[in-house]
């Protein structure tokens, strides 16, 4: 592929996360006792022929800017989340896996397994039904934001399938303008509305969302819109997100959703709403509590004891935001330097963001992973997901999926490079995140 200079300067400015959680206490750099083995360890590099480091970094940059702008706007407005009563959590998540489906068939409530398209291992999107009769569009299901944003055909710079309010009998116009701007200078505008929104058989009526009628960028596909799966406190629309409306209504078999993100462009990626799918992982999930874990929760974040190399912790503790809308993994510059100092031959690329290492050593490199607080496990990243491939066409230097965020903010933004290695469960009923080794 042709090398395109990456947006390191813009990333440095944009990645100063508005989100802030007190820095966890320091810990000794110690080995973890329990090591979880790899599946398909022989694959040591992504096999996508059209993978672009520049395009992925640009998309991630937009997501960071988008989230920061929303959090900043919420703080400026003085908006405070209204605490809603969560339905009692089921003792065990509803499993649609074939081996256990019969044993759990009496569980009350519904669930839906929504297939996702794997776009070169850096973007995963699926179908969403909007309106009456249903109009199907494509959505990036994003755990790092909280708004539902769907372009209409009026947006000439957006990508379809478009939503047409005029043909829906359930559309309601709130007569309130929606405008947002992002750190890269792009803008989006439209109108706040409400509509019947469904994923599979799961439907919410009168769901507030933004219909985008104009944009100067960032809605250029391959998917059309965005559904935020983070918490209401950072919703720019000030609306309860679709999933939480569904959960709070008592309609779900379990008040959670889970992701299986395939690797190497394979089919089978899935968002399971109200359920987990044990055919997509091995072993048992291990769960970690959200921080702060109360009504002020904004994103799906947990305490990270540090990043690991060869199963030993080599960085400081961080707050890890588990973000399905981000492709790579972003950590503070000092922590990225500490991690890559342990990888033979690794050095900071001239873009100031990525680290590179000799491609020839990829097959013998020790595993890179994450340790989470309260666990003796090391959650290693699949080699094929850590190694992004040559930094430029014909280069002998390969790029790592863990990059510098440009900000010393004690935050790790953990995206699809990790989630594709670990089946990820976002458990609202118990305010926790769980991981099991993805098949």
Image: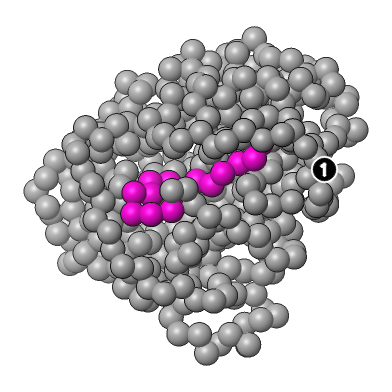
Q: Looking at this view, name the residue that lies furthest to the left.
A: 175
Towards the viewer: 207 or 126? 207
Q: Looking at this view, name the residue that lies furthest to the top.
A: 350
Towards the viewer: 63 or 224? 63
Question: Disc 1 designates what residue?
Answer: 43
Helix, strand or loop status at disc 1: loop
Q: Magenta part of the protein: which range?
A: 293-306
- Relative to 89, say whether 387 is above or below: above
Point out the image quarter for the N terminus: top right
Point out the image quarter for the C terminus: bottom right
**Which residue is at a point 12% across and 52% down the rendered structure image?**
174
- Relative to 377, say whether 405 is above or below: above
Towards the viewer: 98 or 211? 98
Q: Position of residue 310 (x, y in %)?
A: 83, 36
Mark 1 residue crowding within 10 angstroms, few (<14) / some (14–19) / many (20+) = some
Q: How is the image coloured?
A: one colour
Instruction: Look at the image and tell me whether residue 269 can be seen.
Output: no
- Relative to 62, say whether 203 is above or below: below
* Residue 221 located left or right of residue 6: left
Instruction: Look at the image and tell me whether residue 20 can be seen.
Output: yes
**Which residue is at a point 65% across and 60% down the rendered structure image?**
286
Towards the viewer: 110 or 50? 110
Does the magenta run of residues contain 380?
no
Q: Looking at this view, name the residue that lies furthest to the right.
A: 364
Q: Position of residue 246 (x, y in %)?
A: 35, 68
Q: Position of residue 164 (x, y in %)?
A: 24, 54
**Which residue is at a point 88% across and 26% down the rendered structure image?**
361
């Amino acid at each position: 592929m042709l090398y395109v200079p990456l947006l390191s300067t813009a990333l440095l400015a944009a990645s100063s996360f508005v989100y802030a959680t007190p820095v966890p206490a320091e810990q000794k750099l110690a080995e973890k006792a329990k090591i979880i083995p790899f599946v398909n360890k022989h694959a040591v590099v992504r096999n996508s022929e059209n993978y672009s480091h520049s395009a992925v970094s640009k998309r991630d940059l937009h997501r960071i800017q988008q989230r920061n702008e929303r959090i900043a706007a919420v703080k400026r407005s003085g908006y405070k989340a209204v605490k809603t009563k969560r339905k009692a959590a089921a003792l065990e998540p509803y499993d649609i896996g074939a081996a256990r489906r019969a044993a759990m068939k009496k569980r009350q409530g519904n669930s839906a397994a929504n297939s996702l398209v794997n776009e070169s291992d850096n973007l995963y999107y699926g179908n969403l039904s909007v309106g009456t009769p249903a109009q199907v569009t494509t959505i990036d299901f994003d755990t790092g934001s909280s708004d539902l944003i769907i372009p209409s055909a009026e947006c000439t710079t957006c990508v379809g399938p478009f939503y047409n309010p005029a043909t829906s009998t359930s559309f309601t116009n709130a007569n309130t303008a929606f405008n947002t701007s992002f750190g890269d200078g792009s803008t989006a505008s439209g109108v706040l509305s409400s509509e019947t929104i469904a994923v599979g058989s799961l439907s919410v009526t009168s769901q507030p969302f933004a219909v985008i009628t104009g944009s100067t960028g960032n809605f250029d596909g391959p998917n059309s819109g965005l559904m935020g799966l983070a918490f209401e406190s950072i919703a720019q629309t000030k609306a309860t997100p679709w999933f939480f409306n569904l959960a709070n209504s008592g309609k779900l078999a379990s008040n959670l959703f889970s992701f299986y993100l395939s690797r190497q462009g394979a089919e089978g990626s899935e968002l399971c709403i109200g359920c987990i799918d044990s055919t997509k992982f091995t072993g048992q999930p291990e769960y970690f509590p959200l921080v702060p874990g109360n009504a002020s929760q904004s994103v799906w974040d947990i305490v990270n004891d540090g990043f690991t190399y060869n199963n030993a912790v080599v960085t400081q503790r961080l707050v890890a935001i588990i973000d399905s809308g981000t492709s790579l993994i972003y950590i503070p510059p000092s922590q990225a330097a500490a991690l890559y100092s342990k990888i033979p031959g690794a050095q900071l690329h001239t873009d100031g963001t990525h680290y590179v290492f000799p491609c020839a050593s990829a097959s013998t490199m020790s595993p890179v992973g994450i340790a989470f607080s309260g666990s003796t496990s090391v959650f290693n990243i699949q080699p094929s997901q850590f190694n992004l491939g040559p930094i430029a066409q014909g280069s002998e230097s390969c790029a790592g999926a863990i990059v510098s965020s440009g900000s010393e903010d004690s935050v790790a933004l953990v995206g699809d490079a990790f989630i594709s290695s670990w089946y990820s469960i976002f458990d609202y009923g118990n305010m926790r995140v769980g991981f099991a080794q993805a098949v």
